[in-house]
């Protein structure tokens, strides 16, 4: 089976690493000459709106999937005429726009921060009056890793801020005084069967994910699965979806969804019986889903900007290096380390060792 992937970054690369043993081949559509997934499959180097290359991709593959959600709607519509596309155009439409996303949560009875659609500075002033400060202004589309957003703490932060974010449609959200951030990785098959990985506790630095730790029997697991199931059913979703939640007042508020494999699920490569990457491919290909059970205690640490010396990383017991083969650049995710340990105490000690290597960079 040949899988077409829109996007050729590290997520595409890890999909190919998981799918190759299943006998799958891969073609990646990505305009970047140095797309790091290209090492694992065919690289169609073209813009996402290039219909000649989209047609070529559709002719060559059995199905198409995505490694990022900001794919133009026309690209999905065009491809869908010729080849099955998972997840659906509707799932991408909702997930790439924070207004649609939060409105869907609200319609499904899933708690979220207070939110308002912002089309002008006047809308922003009115929404701040209604929601109060502190609040977070985010562009409705194309934001990631904390980009395209600003925390508003005082009236001075509000003045001129709509223009500062580019005068594009935005969402204002009430600031959530969360005690933690967790994510749930779910996978749903074509026949509706759904499986969930254990909740992951995430720590960010300047909006970029730094550390994910897989939990054991988290008290909010059942609630997170309930909220996530509502979304998956509503969208008749196929594939892996990530749900990000704030932990607040002993409950959960939904922050966002990602209709794809997700950074906070990277630990599953060594830490779960079947990884998020393999399960995504199983789901979209119509194959039986694999077990989402955790194997030991697991964590993932991102390498941002550079990868510490390979020999030092792999000298740490229980440590598995994933190097994306990308050029090093400040703020760019260029690799990660997965830790899989027998017990929590060992995991905590090994996390400190990897963090010490990162700090030496
Ligand atoms: P996002 O791009 O929406 O995932 O936001 C990036 C990070 O900003 C989140 O992981 C949180 O740490 C923080 N953040 C986003 N929205 C809020 C909010 N409404 N209240 C408090 N912190 C937030």
Image (tube, grey):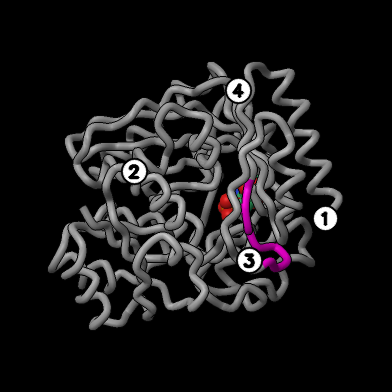
Q: Label 4's element?
A: strand
Do the residues under discs 1 and 2 have CB atoms within 8 angstroms?
Answer: no
Residue 21 - label: 2
Identify the mark nearer the N-term, 4 or 3: 3
Magenta stretch in the rendered image: 328-336
Alpha carbon separation for disc pair 4 and 1: 26 Å
Identify the mark nearer the N-term, 1 or 2: 2
The 10 Å Cα crowd at callout 2, few under 14, some 14 to 19, many 20 or more, is few
Q: Label 2's element?
A: helix
The 10 Å Cα crowd at callout 3, few under 14, some 14 to 19, many 20 or more, is some
Residue at 36 percent across and 41 percent down: it is 278
Residue 18 is situated, as x and y percent measured from the top left of the image, at 39, 45
Identify the mark nearer the N-term, 2 or 3: 2
Residue 94 is situated, as x and y percent measured from the top left of the image, at 36, 56
Residue 361 - label: 1
- Of badges 4 and 3, nearer the viewer stands 4
Residue 178 is situated, as x and y percent measured from the top left of the image, at 67, 36
Alpha carbon separation for disc pair 2 and 3: 55 Å
Task: Decide whether residue 198 is among the magenta residues.
Answer: no
């Amino acid at each position: 089976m040949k899988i077409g992937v829109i996007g050729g970054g590290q997520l595409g690369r890890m999909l190919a690493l998981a799918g190759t043993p299943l006998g799958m081949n891969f073609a990646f559509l990505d305009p970047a000459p140095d797309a790091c997934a290209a090492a694992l499959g065919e690289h169609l180097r073209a813009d996402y709106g290039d219909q000649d290359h989209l047609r070529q991709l559709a002719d060559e593959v059995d199905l198409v999937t995505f490694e990022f959600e900001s794919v133009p709607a026309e690209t999905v519509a065009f491809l869908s005429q010729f080849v099955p596309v998972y997840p659906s155009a509707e799932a991408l439409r909702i997930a790439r726009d924070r207004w649609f996303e939060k409105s869907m949560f609200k319609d499904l009875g899933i708690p979220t921060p207070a939110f308002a659609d912002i089309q002008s500075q006047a809308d922003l002033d009115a929404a701040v009056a209604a929601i109060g400060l502190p609040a977070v202004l985010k562009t409705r589309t194309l934001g990631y890793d904390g980009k395209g957003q600003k925390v508003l703490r005082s009236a001075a932060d509000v003045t001129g801020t709509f223009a500062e974010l580019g005068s594009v449609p935005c969402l204002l959200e009430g600031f959530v005084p969360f005690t933690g951030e967790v994510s749930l990785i779910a996978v749903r098959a074509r026949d509706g069967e759904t499986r969930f990985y254990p909740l992951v506790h995430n720590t960010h630095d300047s909006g970029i994910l730094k550390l994910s730790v897989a939990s054991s029997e988290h008290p909010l697991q059942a609630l997170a699965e309930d909220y996530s199931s509502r979304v998956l059913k509503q969208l008749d979703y196929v594939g892996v979806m990530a749900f990000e939640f704030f932990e607040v007042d002993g409950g959960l508020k939904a922050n966002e969804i990602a209709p794809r494999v997700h950074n906070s699920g990277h630990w599953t490569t060594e830490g779960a019986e079947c990884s998020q990457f393999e399960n995504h491919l199983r789901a979209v290909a119509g194959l039986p889903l694999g077990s989402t059970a955790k194997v030991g205690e697991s964590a993932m640490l991102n390498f941002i900007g550079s990868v510490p010396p390979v020999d030092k990383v792999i000298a740490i017991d229980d440590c598995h290096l994933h190097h994306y083969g990308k050029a090093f650049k400040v703020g760019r995710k260029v690799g990660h380390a997965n830790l899989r340990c027998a017990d929590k105490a060992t995991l905590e000690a090994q996390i400190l060792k990897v963090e010490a290597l990162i700090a030496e960079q």
